[in-house]
């Protein structure tokens, strides 16, 4: 194969690939990603209003939150994932926009301390219950029981005989 | 003049309250009945004094004295009379006056009832209730005075002060800002008083508990005296919480009933410890055990009541700065800390005499199961307390605020709620003192089989979510255990007395109101649980912008946008109301009217959903947005909330059960 033919072939391939790529880009531009309100709300419900207290973005009625919902829509249209949008909002407005504290630093207390306290309570409870049961069982020794119950039975029989006599 | 009278009454009430507390202490320490009787009379006078103060404040609100800053903030000319009356508790200052008034009413009720019988405790009850009242009156008079007025200085500035600053003149605005629109709802009108009634009622058992600690009478007498108070407190707190849930569902427009907001949790926390206390006192009554634990629970509940009152209205926990700038925030915390430390110190002093008389004899006995119940309630409290307070700690330490959304709470508390349901299914059939696997198993298998059948039905319906399957099984288990318990009682009565079923149910409940009222409460809770599972697991939603004639599809339903109209009303608001048609399988079911009311006086909107409720589900439509001029295109959000009606039905059953449990039984009147 002649060298010029190879160059021509590669050149044509590059041009064709170029057209294909451009065509793809144009196709993408012509048919933008359609993002529904439900998709926006899905992401917005995972984010909290940075201004209002404890209101998720999907239900917050303020003007600011409406703009943030529009921003979410834009990001979704640009192909961002929900996780990327959440990270973007957290970077912009702080961790308070996330639905729960991220697992890092001091926040670990949230995930460790309450379950640990409940587990501690359970152990304490078990200790109390088992301790009480042990105390109940301990004083009753094998030697004492027959003697004491024997005495008791003797007293009962005596009492019954008395009553019979009456 | 009227304003000064109101303020003067508050000052007088504070003086009388302080005198009552001091006189009671003097009377007890000198063993002088004259001082104690004087303290009692003084504590009784606080009620009429505060009643007059409340009447004065209501007069100012209803007659539009907008020179009073509180009246200006919570009332307006356009508001109807009934709303003006509820404005008494529509703001922080009025709420604190209302709280104080209820406290005076309840302490008077205690003083008027059986003074001779409970004479040993009552002087100390006066001290505790009056100290609580002094704190609240102090807050009202020095920091949250509802009688403060507007004054104009010669420099043209507006000042809020009780008495005229030099050279200033009274400023009288023509109209007020009006009550927050969110509070103009029937649920919200009754919700705060119910919550406050619950809060204040819990002060009474706490006062008796402290009296028991101080006097050394640490047997179960204080519990028997306050048994009904505790149930009444629990009932009111429950009604308050349920009304709050209904209000959130009807007004907040997010399709749910519980958002795990700090204010909601503030009211839930004393309910959790109070419910644990209600169960735990039964162990002390039956077996003389866990006296220390009961003391701790009632102390905790009291301090959570104070904390709840503070949190509900102040909003100062929203940030460290808000807390630091708030005058009442640190004082509330100081009072909570002081009462907690003093109460615990008193408890430690009596630690030995609070030791259990009985012993736990079986791992499956009812008292052991009640203890596990207490652990779960305390676990719920710990999670809630942490969720509410950690954001403040985080901001303090790292400067970074964090949020706790519903997902976190559901994950953290879900297993604990499930555990409580399981206990509700086991504890009623376990015996006091001795209960073995054998005895429990013999009683358990009969109600257990129908609960498994319910799981079969759930699976046959195509439900596969593990959470829902477990939830429905627990609901079925509690239902069959409760019905089984009733059936056992009915059968026993029928055999011994020949009564028919209805007579037997009536007599059973009448003879043991607390037990059978409690079972009805359990039934109410499982109906509520059905609603919770329905909405938490199966809720569906969709949103879309529609032009008239267009539709949104959700599950089997079609919601069609018919029209939208906008107009001004005589009571000062702008209403935008849409007409929506709900249909299923081509059949029109109902028209709904979601709307958005905009209040001109307070410049706040309020979203009111259109709701179609059935026992199967709710279709809940919200008007999100619309084009104001053409009103052609509008955005709607539609929710399908399965089984949510059962939540409200269960609440009614729960309240009925509580009323049965609370109802007096004269022949068994307590007190030994």
Image (cartoon, rainbow, N blue to C red):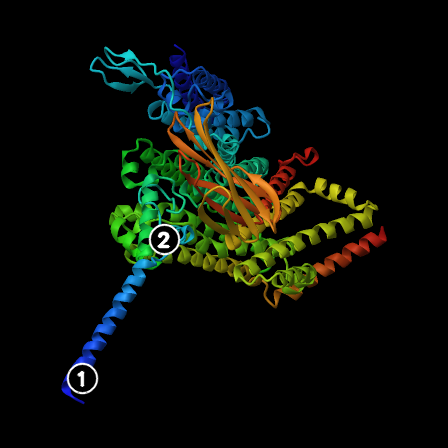
**CA separation in Å, label 2 and label 1:** 61 Å
**Mark closer to the observer (2, 1):** 1
Residue in the image at 23% along x and 77% along y: A13
Residue carrying label 1: A6
Residue placed most toward the observer, B33 or A153: B33
Q: Toward which corner of the image does residue B431 lie, by quadrant?
A: bottom right
Residue in the image at 67% along x and 41% along y: B513
- Where disc 1 sits, the SS reads helix
Locate the N terminus of chain B by quadrant: top left
> In the picture provided, is B426 more to the left or to the right than B638?
right
Residue projecting furthest to the left: A3
Residue in the image at 33% along x and 39% along y: A63
Q: Is residue B426 above or below residue B208?
A: below
Subunit under mark 2: A
**Mark earlier in primary sequence (2, 1):** 1
Say which mark, if any, is on residue A100: 2
Q: Is residue A66 visible?
A: yes
Location of residue B577 in the rendering, given as x and y in whole percent from the top left corner: 48, 34
């Amino acid at each position: 194969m002649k060298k010029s033919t190879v160059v021509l072939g590669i050149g044509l391939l590059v041009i064709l690939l170029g057209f294909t790529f451009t065509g793809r880009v144009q196709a993408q531009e012509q048919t933008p990603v359609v993002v529904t309100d439900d998709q926006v709300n899905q992401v917005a419900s995972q984010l909290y209003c940075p201004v209002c207290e404890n209101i998720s973005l999907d239900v917050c009625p303020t003007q600011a939150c409406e703009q943030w919902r529009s921003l979410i829509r834009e990001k979704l249209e640009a192909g961002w994932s929900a996780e990327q949008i959440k990270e973007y909002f957290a970077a912009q407005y702080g961790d308070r926009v996330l639905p729960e504290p991220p697992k890092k630093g001091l926040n670990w207390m949230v995930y460790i301390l309450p379950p640990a306290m409940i587990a501690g309570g359970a152990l304490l409870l078990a200790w109390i219950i088992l301790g009480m049961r042990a105390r109940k069982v301990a004083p009753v020794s094998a030697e004492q029981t027959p003697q004491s119950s024997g005495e008791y039975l003797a007293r009962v029989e005596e009492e019954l005989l008395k009553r019979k006599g009456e | 003049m009227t304003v000064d009278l109101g303020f003067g009454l508050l000052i007088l009430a504070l003086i009388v309250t302080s005198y009552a507390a001091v006189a009671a202490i003097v009377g007890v320490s000198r063993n002088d009945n004259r001082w104690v009787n004087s303290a009692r009379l003084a504590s009784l006078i606080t009620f009429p004094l505060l009643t007059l103060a409340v009447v004065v404040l209501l007069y100012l609100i209803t007659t539009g004295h907008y020179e009073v800053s509180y009246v200006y903030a919570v009332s307006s000319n356009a508001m109807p009379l009934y709303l003006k009356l509820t404005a008494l508790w529509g703001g922080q200052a009025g709420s604190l006056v209302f709280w104080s008034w209820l406290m005076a009413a309840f302490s008077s009720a205690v003083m008027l009832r059986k003074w001779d019988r409970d004479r040993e405790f009552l002087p100390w009850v006066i001290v505790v209730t009056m100290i609580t009242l002094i704190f609240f009156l102090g807050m009202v008079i020095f920091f949250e005075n509802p009688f403060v007025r507007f004054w104009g200085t010669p420099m043209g500035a507006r000042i809020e002060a009780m008495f005229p600053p030099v050279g200033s003149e009274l400023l009288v605005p023509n109209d007020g800002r009006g009550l927050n629109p969110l509070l103009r709802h029937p649920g919200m009108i009754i919700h705060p008083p119910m919550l406050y009634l619950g809060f204040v009622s819990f002060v009474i058992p706490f006062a008796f508990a402290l009296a028991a600690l101080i006097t050394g009478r640490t047997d179960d007498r204080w519990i028997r005296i306050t048994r009904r108070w505790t149930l009444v407190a629990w009932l009111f707190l429950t009604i308050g919480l349920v009304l709050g849930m209904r209000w959130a569902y009807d007004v907040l427009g997010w399709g749910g009933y519980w958002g795990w907001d700090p204010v909601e949790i503030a009211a839930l926390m004393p309910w959790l410890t109070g419910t644990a206390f209600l169960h735990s006192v039964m162990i002390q009554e039956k077996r003389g055990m866990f006296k220390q634990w009961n003391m701790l629970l009632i102390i905790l509940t009291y301090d959570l009541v104070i904390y709840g009152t503070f949190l509900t209205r102040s909003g100062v926990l929203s940030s460290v700065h808000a807390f630091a700038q708030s005058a009442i925030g640190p004082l509330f915390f100081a009072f909570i800390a002081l009462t907690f430390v003093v109460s615990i110190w008193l408890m430690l002093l009596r630690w030995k005499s609070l030791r259990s008389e009985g012993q736990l004899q079986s791992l499956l006995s009812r008292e052991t199961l009640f203890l596990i119940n207490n652990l779960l309630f305390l676990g719920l409290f710990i999670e809630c307390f942490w969720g509410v307070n950690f954001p403040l700690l985080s901001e303090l330490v790292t400067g970074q605020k964090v949020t706790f959304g519903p997902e976190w709470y559901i994950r953290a508390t879900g297993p604990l709620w499930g555990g409580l349901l399981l206990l509700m299914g086991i504890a009623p059939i376990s015996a006091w003192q001795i209960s073995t696997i054998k005895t429990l198993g013999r009683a358990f298998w009969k109600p257990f089989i129908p609960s498994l059948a319910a799981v079969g039905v759930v699976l046959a319906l195509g439900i596969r979510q593990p959470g829902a399957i477990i939830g429905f099984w627990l609901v079925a288990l509690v239902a069959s255990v409760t019905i089984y318990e009733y059936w056992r009682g009915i059968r026993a009565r029928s055999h011994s007395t020949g009564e028919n079923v209805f007579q037997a149910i009536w007599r059973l409940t009448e003879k043991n109101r607390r037990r059978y009222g409690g079972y009805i409460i359990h039934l109410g809770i499982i109906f509520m649980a059905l609603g919770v599972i329905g909405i938490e697991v199966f809720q569906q939603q969709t949103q879309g912008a529609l032009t008239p004639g267009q539709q949104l599809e959700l599950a089997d339903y079609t919601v069609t946008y018919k029209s939208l109209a906008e107009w001004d009303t005589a009571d000062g608001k702008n209403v935008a109301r849409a007409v929506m048609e709900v249909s299923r399988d081509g059949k029109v079911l109902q028209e709904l009217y979601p709307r958005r009311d905009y209040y001109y006086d307070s410049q706040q909107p309020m979203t009111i959903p259109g709701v179609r409720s059935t026992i199967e589900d709710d279709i809940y439509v919200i008007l999100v947005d619309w084009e104001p001029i053409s009103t052609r295109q509008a955005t709607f959000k539609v929710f399908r909330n399965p089984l949510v009606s059962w939540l409200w039905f269960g609440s009614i059953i729960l309240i009925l059960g509580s009323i049965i449990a609370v109802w007096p039984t004269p022949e068994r009147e307590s007190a030994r």
